[in-house]
Amino acid sequence: MNTSKRNYRATFILDNRGKEDSTDAIIETVKAEITSIHGDVKAVEALGKRDFVRVTDPKFTSASYVQIDFSAPAEAPAALKERLRLNQNVYRTFVESV
């Protein structure tokens, strides 16, 4: 396995409707997932609650956005998306190389 790490910026849309989990608890869960795929979290920025441009569910029109900068191996973005796919607290995940 290649040990060199690349820098990434991931944007997450969090969904805590009807759940007791706070946004901070969900962010800690996501940070733990990044660490589990051999990533190092550099910075976390909570962007606040924003309205969706395209609403797919009339009962879900806005959500909290979070950006996390991290470094990880090249296969990490796909692994992170797969690990978070079944997580009900993360509505969408977008990972880009920085």
Image: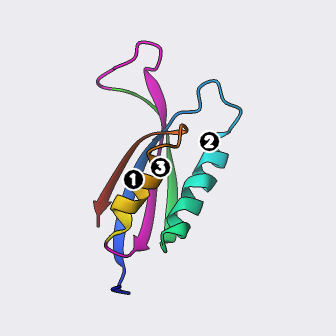
> In this rendering, would 34 be left or right of 9?
right
Label 2 residue SS: helix
In this view, the residue in front, 41 or 46, is 41
Residue range corresponding to the magenta coloring: 53-74
Q: Which colour style is shown?
A: rainbow
Question: Quick check: 40 above or below 18?
Answer: below
CA separation in Å, label 3 and label 2: 16 Å
Q: Residue at x 59, y 32 (%)?
A: 16
Label 2 or label 1, whichever comes before in sequence order: 2
Asked if the residue under mark 1 is in contact with the one under mark 2, i.e. CB atoms within 8 Å, the reply is no
CA separation in Å, label 3 and label 1: 5 Å
Q: Residue 96's spot in the image, x, y percent?
A: 29, 59
Q: Is residue 61 magenta?
A: yes
Residue receiving disc 3:
84
Amino acid type shown at disc 3? Leu
Residue sitting farthest toward the right = 20
Question: Quick check: 17 above or below 10?
Answer: above
Q: Residue 67's spot in the image, x, y percent?
A: 44, 53
Label 3 residue SS: helix
In the rendered image, the quadrant that contains the C terminus is bottom left
Residue receiving disc 1:
81
Asked if the residue under mark 2 is in contact with the one under mark 3, i.e. CB atoms within 8 Å, the reply is no
* Residue 33 sits in quarter: bottom right
Q: Residue at x 48, y 69 (%)?
A: 37
Residue receiving disc 2:
23
Asked if the residue under mark 1 is in contact with the one under mark 3, i.e. CB atoms within 8 Å, the reply is yes
Question: Quick check: 49 above or below 33?
Answer: above
- Which dot, 3 or 2, sits closer to the camera? 3
Q: Residue 39's spot in the image, x, y percent?
A: 48, 72
